Image: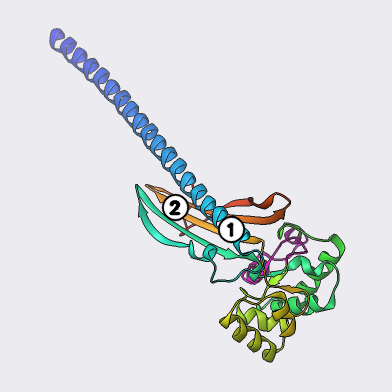
Amino acid sequence: MRRARRTGMILLNVLMVVAVAAAAATVMIVAQDMEVRRSIRLHDAAQARAYARAGELSAVVALRRDALTAPEVDHPGEAWNTIGQNAIAVPGGTFALSITDEQAKFNVNALAQGDPIPTAAFLAIGAASNVPRPTLEQIVATLVLLGPISDETPLRALGIPTRELEALATRVTYLPPEARLNVNTTDPGLLSLVLSDNATVRRLVEARGRAALTEEDAGSLGAGSWLGVRSDHFRVETQVRMGEVTRGTSSLIRRALTPTGPSVAVVQRRQVRVGGTDDA
């Protein structure tokens, strides 16, 4: 009887040792699996970053070439506007790229000098974006007081609601004050808000449909001296999916003419959400 009890205790101890060993092995396997998945994810994230940088580089090259061959005007028919790429398959995932003229939007920093003409244009844009007039007047007063700003951060700090800044975002941008709205690339709807003269807008749109407008053309058609025909600021957006990693990148590219030739560089880069997922 005692021998049977002793044998049972030994068997129980053996089973307990086996159970503990099995649990430890399971923990080790799970930890290894997590480490492998983490390594794969880091590799995919690095690949996604590489594709995003390659997209930026293709835009930089195209914009530099354009500055060398056609520095006087910028319009949608130029080569830089053709490098956009809908989502295509690449090894391990997909890649998409878009490039847009940031000077096709109204430059908020045009308000900094207190000029009534850009101020009236901004108020019209705000009204069309369903932003309350007091908010718009607060933005104008802030720009006059602070001078040019590089993004909407100072406006957020002053309590401008995010939803109202987002409502403006499709029509406005934050560029150096000298960056003028490009009448060759601006949407006709925005032109109508800015100029508040449908006849002038119609003449401009019809003329640019035949050929890119020069400074002289735009002036003779009533565009106004605070509007331009060329651009030096462009937005490049890439969307890359590698395995389980999705990365969206929005980059601002600035172009400038220097004594040694055109300079083109990425001056701002931020990660954006793609399809409701976080990038890695």
Q: Nearer the viewer, residue 36 or 29?
A: 36
Q: Nearer the viewer, mark 1 or mark 2?
A: 1
- Sooner in the amino-acid sequence: mark 1 or mark 2: 1
Q: Residue 249's spot in the image, x, y percent?
A: 53, 53
Furthest residue in direction top, as rendered: 3
Residue under numbered circle 2 = 240
Q: Is residue 254 in view from this perspective?
A: yes
Q: How far is mark 1 from mark 2, CA to CA?
A: 22 Å
Residue tagged by mark 1? 63
Determine whether, in the image, residue 274 is placed left or right of residue 131: left
Q: Quadrant of residue 107?
A: bottom right
- Per the rendered image, the range of residues in magenta is 155-179
Q: Who is closer to the viewer here, 17 or 220?
A: 220
Q: Label 2 sits on what residue type?
A: Val
Is residue 160 rendered to the left or right of residue 85? right
* Circle 1: residue type: Leu
Question: Where residue 234 sits in the image (x, y, percent)?
Answer: 61, 61
Under circle 1, the secondary element is helix
Asked if 94 appears above or below 167 in the picture, the reply is above
Are the residues flagged by discs 1 and 2 in contact, CB closer than 8 Å?
A: no
